[in-house]
Image (tube, rainbow, N blue to C red):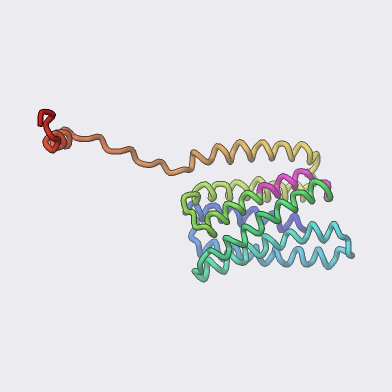
Amino acid sequence: MGAVGLLYVGAVLFINGLMLLKKVEPRAAGVFNLFVGTLQVITPTVLIITSGGDALTILGASGIYLFGFTYLYVGINLLGGFDSTGIGYFSLFVAIMAIGYSWANFQLLGDPAFGVIWLYWSYLWFLFFVLLGLKNEQITTYTGWVTAIEGWITAAIPAFMVLTGYWRNTNVIAIVLAVFGLVVFIALWPLTRKREPAPAEPTPSDQLGAEGRRRPRWT
């Protein structure tokens, strides 16, 4: 059941990434955030209720709330036009907790691939903190691309692989994900930074004017 919710997390991250890239209108994205946020609150609740008290199942389900609350928060903010600071600082909380869930996947749940994916999410939610909490709009384009890419790499594709029974050899998948993330996200940084316009070349009249204003050497 968790894989079904993860599939639609991929969709909402993709849409939110396009929104940051100014391809999707914010209020339109807000509606879909509410849909997925609601799903990602219902899903872990059902998983926990039906877990029979299994600690590892509850652990795995508990992390889903981090994203469910994020998307509900984003949806309400976009539709209501509220300030983004609260989402930004909640994103910092998510980024920190995601490191713990990464450790849990490596050490307790036996899924190193999702251990790497949680690190992806930690990085992305930290970007949300910088963008929305600290109001650093210079990283908007970079964050948009990272969000859209992670929608596929960390959610839609893994969810589909789990649903079709192809989520195997997780050690190999973890290595591929780690290498892909480092290469792509480092390469994106210079490509998405706005280049400052080069200073205009001085015209002959500007040069003459400058000469006219310059004091003669012999005085």
Horizontally, is 178 left or right of 129 in the view? right
User: Furthest-top residue in view?
Assistant: 218
Seen at 47% across and 53% down, the residue is 137
Please tell me in which quadrant of the rendered image residue 76 appears.
bottom right
The structure residue drawn at horizontal position 57% and vertical position 60%, both measured from the top left corner, is 88
Outermost residue toward the front in this view: 219
Residue 29, horizontal then vertical, whole percent: 54, 61
The magenta-colored residue range is 109-120
Of residues 217 and 15, the one nearer the viewer is: 217
Give the residue at x 72% y 44%: 116
Give the percent coordinates (x, y) of residue 211: 14, 33
| Residue located 85% across and 65% down the image | 50
Answer with left or right where residue 114 lies relative to residue 144: right
Does the magenta run of residues contain 195? Answer: no
Image quarter where the N terminus lies is bottom right
Figure disc tally: 0
Q: Quadrant of the C terminus?
A: top left
Q: Is residue 34 above or below residue 161?
A: below
x then y, percent, for residue 131: 52, 55
Q: Quadrant location of residue 90?
A: bottom right
Q: Position of residue 140 (x, y in %)?
A: 49, 51
Asked whether, in this view, residue 96 is left or right of residue 20, the answer is right
Q: Nearer the viewer, residue 140 or 204?
A: 204
Closer to the camera in the image, 49 or 105: 105
- Residue 117: say if magenta: yes
Q: Is residue 136 above or below residue 218?
A: below
Is the stretch drawn in magenta largely helix, strand or loop? Answer: helix
